[in-house]
Image: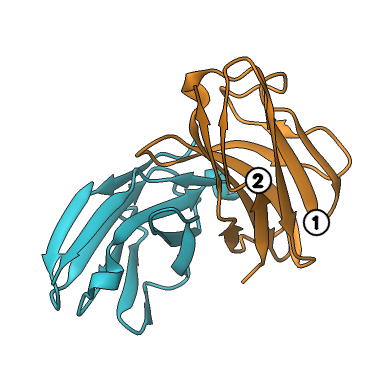
Chain colours: A orange, B cyan
Amino acid sequence: SAVISQKPSRDICQRGTSLTIQCQVDSQVTMMFWYRQQPGQSLTLIATANQGSEATYESGFVIDKFPISRPNLTFSTLTVSNMSPEDSSIYLCSGLRGPQTFQETQYFGPGTRLLVL
Amino acid sequence: GENVEQHPSTLSVQEGDSAVIKCTYSDSASNYFPWYKQELGKGPQLIIDIRSNVGEKKDQRIAVTLNKTAKHFSLHITETQPEDSAVYFCAAPKAAGNKLTFGGGTRVLVKP
């Protein structure tokens, strides 16, 4: 399995502020993704983090709210901007191992638990 | 896009009994179906997956079956133990690519 770490593991933030979450993966990972998991809910894909270029966002998510960077193969950041209480969620980083032409296994980090007051 | 439905949303079983969770998907081109277990305070952990060229896969007490014609797949846990208590998610790829669509999750409680 891939080794994926995230930090911070949790945070409590004030509305209107921004938080940057970091994700570090091992060198076997090719693609990286960011998900949101609202309290008691399933996982929703926010975007695909592309190395050295703009992330690819899913419907309902925009770059101004969730800017993502991936400066190299093994590191990515997700920023939650201008936070409101509705942004209180678990944010999960995941990595895909194997050739991009095949559907390979996605592994998840431990998540960042965000509470916005 | 892919739509994945998962049932039941909660499941309570007696220790030692079996648990079955079912998922249906909409995209007939989907060819990979993973199952994840999420314990409280942790990220989802892959427990088993199946590809469309097989109908069943087993790993000790867990098994997954796939019916491509009916577009559904199921997770079977036998001889359940208290440590099996968690939330389980099924998933299927969007448009047979690498992005996953997740089911709504099943909260499993194994009573000792």
Between residues B111 and B50, which one lies in front from this camera angle? B111
Q: How crowded is mark 2: few (under 14 residues within 10 Å), some or many (20 or more)?
A: many
**In the displayed structure image, the side of residue A41 where residue A88 appears, left or right:** right
Task: Kindly identify the amino acid type of the residue bearing the numbered disc 1.
Answer: Thr
Say which quarter of the image contains residue A25: bottom right
Task: Tell me: residue A10, above or below residue A57.
Answer: below
Q: How crowded is mark 1: few (under 14 residues within 10 Å), some or many (20 or more)?
A: some
Q: Residue drawn 66% across and 60% down?
A: A4
Q: Can residue B8 be seen in this view?
A: no
Q: Can residue A86 be seen in this view?
A: yes
**Residue under numbered circle 2:** A33
Task: Tell me: residue B65, above or below residue B101.
Answer: below
**In the displayed structure image, the side of residue B82 where residue B3 appears, left or right:** right
Q: Residue drawn 66% across and 67% down?
A: A2
**Residue under numbered circle 1:** A74
Between residues A34 and A22, which one lies in front from this camera angle? A22
- Under circle 1, the secondary element is loop
Task: Tell me: residue B57, above or below residue B19.
Answer: below
Between residues B73 and A23, which one lies in front from this camera angle? A23
Q: How far apart are marks 1 and 2 (CA)?
A: 12 Å
Q: Chain letter for mark 1, please.
A: A
Say which quarter of the image contains residue A3: bottom right
